[in-house]
Image (tube, helix red, strand yellow):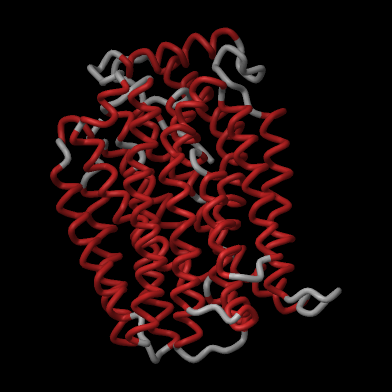
């Protein structure tokens, strides 16, 4: 995990550039692997329901519509509490609030193993969204206090590796848990899955409280010169005419555009994450363990493309086309996969392209808010954009389940979401070049 001087200000001496590299390398190693692990745990608890579905629905006699609605209700809770959660985080500090988020979501995710009725399923998924609300926008806000704009896309890419990693490792792991633990001590494999995979979130939540510094001045791993250098770099960003007020978070058209762009991201992300195991099963694979292994392939490619695109975006100081090209690849993959639904190999290849595209765009999208927002506006704006975006999470889970129950096919939903990705391309190009390409 390295840095480059691409993000530094022209005119600095070589000694200062070297000191900057050393400073940001230290910050990367101290903060990003830990946050990546936390995001891994968060996303695993959010989407392990996709592979649990292979046993859970038949055991509980749930339909695809019930599954889709339950998956979607997570996002309702998330949307309602996202902005308040991020404002609380800004007031009480990241250490306390992120620890609270992780511990409560871990407990609620574990309780899913005891679900018996649709009502219980709906309630727990909604509460899981309430508990987790604010984690992603909170971490993104926190990173703006440690890394200047020009370095942000690569940093966010490294943090967001936790998302594809959770599916890369979690898919095979979940398949193994459901196979190896099935019917042990009177519990089915899907129940063991929720119980065991909740433990890391709880333990990491406790670790957050002891590991995470709230501010630059309270960071014990930085010396006085490094703190001064970091605050100087961050102050330079704050002098670029960015908007600070709470009102700006809700009235700035760029925040709305950002939310709609990320809505497209989540349409693609969750259409694949929540439904990939079912799509692979429908292509002809019946073994739960084999399905879990095959879900790792799209996520391995996603990790590579996420890192390449994040680094490239920072290097060339370009954001818009680093969103448009990946979005176009996702649209192609989603739409083309509907023509090869009977072939496992073609399905995995095309959904790997789709997954890599949406993952590659994600860190670039979330490098945008800090280019035009700061302070309270950044806290509320990032959370508000996430709230808009999570409507896509609800749509991709509930709508796909509803469409599948009625058409007995995933094709209509995947084509619809592919078209949405193309709309996202137009929204990205509409963002002001002179502002976002910092």
Seen in the picture, residue 151 relative to 388 is either above or below; the reply is above
Q: Quadrant of residue 348?
A: bottom left
| Residue shown at 27% from the left, 23% from the top | 247
Q: Is residue 310 toward the left or the right of residue 88 in the image?
A: left
| Residue shown at 27% from the left, 78% from the top | 412
Query: Where's residue 231, x and y in %?
Result: 45, 13
| Residue shown at 30% from the left, 15% from the top | 11
Query: Where's residue 143, x and y in %?
Result: 47, 30
Q: Is residue 289 visible?
A: no
Q: Toward the viewer: 35 or 392?
A: 392
Q: Toward the viewer: 341 or 438?
A: 341
Q: Is residue 348 toward the left or the right of residue 264 in the image?
A: right
Q: Quadrant of the C terminus?
A: top left
Q: Is residue 173 visible?
A: yes
| Residue shown at 37% from the left, 21% from the top | 376
Q: Toward the viewer: 85 or 289?
A: 85
Query: Where's residue 349, x and y in %?
Result: 40, 77
Q: Is residue 349 toward the left or the right of residue 415 in the image?
A: right
Q: Quadrant of the N terminus?
A: top right
Q: Quadrant of residue 343?
A: bottom left
Q: Is residue 347 toward the left or the right of residue 181 in the image?
A: left
Q: How many marks?
A: 0
Seen in the picture, residue 234 relative to 425 is either above or below; the reply is above
Residue lying at the far right of the rendered structure? 185
Seen in the picture, residue 96 relative to 304 is either above or below; the reply is above
């Amino acid at each position: 995990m390295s840095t480059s001087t691409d993000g530094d200000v022209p005119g600095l001496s070589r000694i200062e550039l070297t000191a900057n590299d050393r400073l940001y390398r230290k910050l990367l190693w101290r903060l990003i692997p830990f946050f990546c692990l936390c995001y891994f745990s968060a996303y695993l608890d959010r989407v392990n329901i996709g592979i649990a579905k292979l046993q859970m629905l038949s055991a509980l006699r749930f339909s695809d519509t019930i599954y889709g609605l339950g998956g979607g209700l997570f996002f309702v809770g998330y949307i309602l509490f996202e902005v308040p959660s991020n404002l609380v985080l800004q007031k009480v500090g990241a250490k306390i609030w992120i620890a609270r988020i992780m511990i409560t979501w871990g407990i609620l995710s574990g309780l899913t193993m005891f679900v018996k009725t649709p009502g219980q399923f709906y309630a727990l998924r909604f509460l899981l969204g309430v508990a987790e609300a604010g984690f992603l926008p909170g971490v993104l806000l926190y990173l703006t206090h440690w890394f200047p704009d020009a370095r942000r896309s690569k940093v966010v890419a490294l943090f967001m590796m936790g998302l594809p990693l959770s599916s890369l490792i979690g898919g095979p792991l979940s398949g193994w848990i459901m196979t190896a633990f099935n019917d042990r001590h009177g519990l089915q494999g899907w129940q063991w899955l929720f119980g065991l995979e909740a433990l890391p979130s709880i333990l990491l939540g406790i670790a957050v409280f002891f590991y995470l510094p709230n501010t630059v001045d309270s960071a014990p791993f930085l010396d006085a010169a490094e703190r001064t250098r970091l605050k100087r770099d961050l102050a330079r960003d704050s002098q670029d005419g960015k908007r600070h007020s709470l009102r700006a978070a809700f009235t700035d058209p760029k925040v709305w555009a950002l939310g709609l762009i990320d809505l497209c991201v989540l349409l693609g992300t969750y259409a694949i994450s929540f439904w990939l195991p079912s799509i692979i099963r429908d292509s002809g694979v019946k073994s739960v363990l084999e399905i879990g292994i095959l879900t790792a392939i799209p996520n391995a490619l996603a990790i590579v493309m996420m890192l390449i695109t994040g680094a490239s975006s920072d290097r060339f100081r370009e954001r818009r086309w680093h969103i448009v090209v990946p979005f176009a690849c996702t649209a192609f993959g989603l739409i083309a996969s509907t023509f090869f639904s009977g072939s496992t190999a073609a399905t995995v290849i095309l959904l790997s392209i789709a997954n890599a595209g949406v993952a590659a765009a994600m860190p670039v999208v979330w490098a945008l808010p800090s280019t035009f927002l700061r302070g309270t506006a950044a806290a509320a704006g990032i959370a508000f954009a996430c709230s808009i975006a999570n409507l896509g999470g609800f749509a991709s889970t509930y709508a796909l389940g509803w469409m599948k129950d009625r058409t007995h096919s995933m094709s209509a939903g995947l084509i619809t979401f592919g078209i949405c990705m193309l709309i996202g391309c137009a929204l990205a190009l509409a963002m002001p070049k002179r502002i976002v390409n910092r």
